[in-house]
Amino acid sequence: MNREDIVFNYPSKVIFGEGKSRELPEHILQLGSKRPALITGPNMPKTEAFGQIKRTLQDAGLNPFMFHGVEPEPPIELLEDASNMIRKEGCDLLIGLGGGSTMDFTKVLGVLAKWDDVVLEQIIGINKVPRKGLPVILLPTTSGSGSEVSPVAIFTFKEEQVKKGIVSPYLVCDVAIVDPVLTWEVPRHITASTGMDALIHGIESFISINSNPLSRELSLSAIRKIYGFLERAVLDGKDRQARYNVSLGSLLAGMAFSMAGTAAVHALAYPLGGEFHVPHGVANTVMLRHVLEYNLPGNEKLYEEMAQTMISPLKDRESKKICPDDVIDLVMKLAEAIEVPSRLRDLGIPKEAIPRMAEAAFEEKRLLGNNPKQLSVEDIRLIYERAW
């Protein structure tokens, strides 16, 4: 297939806008559900966002089964327990309310809860899910993962201390409802790290060798919105304009990487999450500068285009010539301003771990295959050393 060809799978319906989560009951009914299940993490029931969704469902006469057990970077063992509960309760539709971990969990849970013959270990990788599972509706409460529109789910394998992906069009949810209001309560540090994750989705999908004209437009739009408004959203979580734009930017970035993929930043971040349980957005940010520097030679025009997108709204646009490495300085200054760590040592990761992390990252062929430059194990090791 020509790299300029455009092929994509998105949910049958994507709804974006303030207050749109109140339309959840009509989408449940349209999908023919009589017994939905609401899937969240343990802290979600304490939030106003959860209360709003619960009231919306109750007002519509819906009384869903509640599962509040999703952990950050969920281990695979949780899926079996949850799928048994969903079957026992006779649930016929899943609603994932939360961040990327909850949405990833819900997508795979829909498959396992419907089909007894699907074994989780056998669907790790690309296009190994045999068929569609239960209908799934996703409502993100963070602006970061883009999981609501992606065919990807990431899980932690504790014994191996690695994260692995399941990629399949059968994981694309049926309905995605992206309501910026659901992000208003997110704490500053989570707004910052998930926002950086979304910005990196835009950057990596733009320079991916599998990008296409549509994905590149989505990437640049995502970069512009997230870069322009993330700091404001971190400083004031109730800044409606900032939350709106970061939420929309995250959605657009999710659409972009669903087509083009992410690349070496994510590949090198995975061992940090798998072994040291570093939050995903933080792990990506720590690797960002040094992977961007590695990828810069030969990709100057792409970097200039991203920098132009970031600088163009600023007043000093005419006062300086845009250089390719401006994009690196701009994103790292943003990370510093919103207090997302940018060094491995600041996360307590020992330097002795670098060789084994390099070996683990080198095995992330799915992600490294999207990178504009090839990396050897030695290249990866040197990047980790620079990041330390």
Image: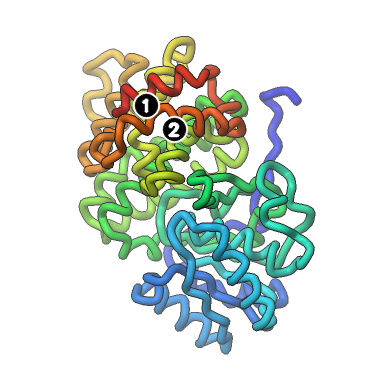
Comparing 87 with 239, the one in front is: 87
Quadrant, the C terminus: top left
Kind of residue at disc 1:
Tyr
Q: How is the image coloured?
A: rainbow
Q: Position of residue 74 (x, y in %)?
A: 49, 58
- Residue behind mark 2: 357
Instruction: Give the distance between the C-alpha atoms of the residues marked 2 and 1, in whole angstroms.
Output: 8 Å
Relative to residue 178, is residue 49 depicted above or below? below
Q: Is residue 111 left or right of residue 225?
A: right
Relative to residue 339, is residue 58 depicted above or below? below
Whether tag 2 and tag 1 are in contact, CB under 8 A, the answer is yes
Which residue is located at x 57 percent, y 35 percent? 261
Comparing 59 with 81, the one in front is: 81
Kind of residue at disc 2:
Met
Q: Position of residue 303 (x, y in %)?
A: 42, 20
Relative to residue 292, is residue 129 depicted above or below? below
- Residue behind mark 1: 384
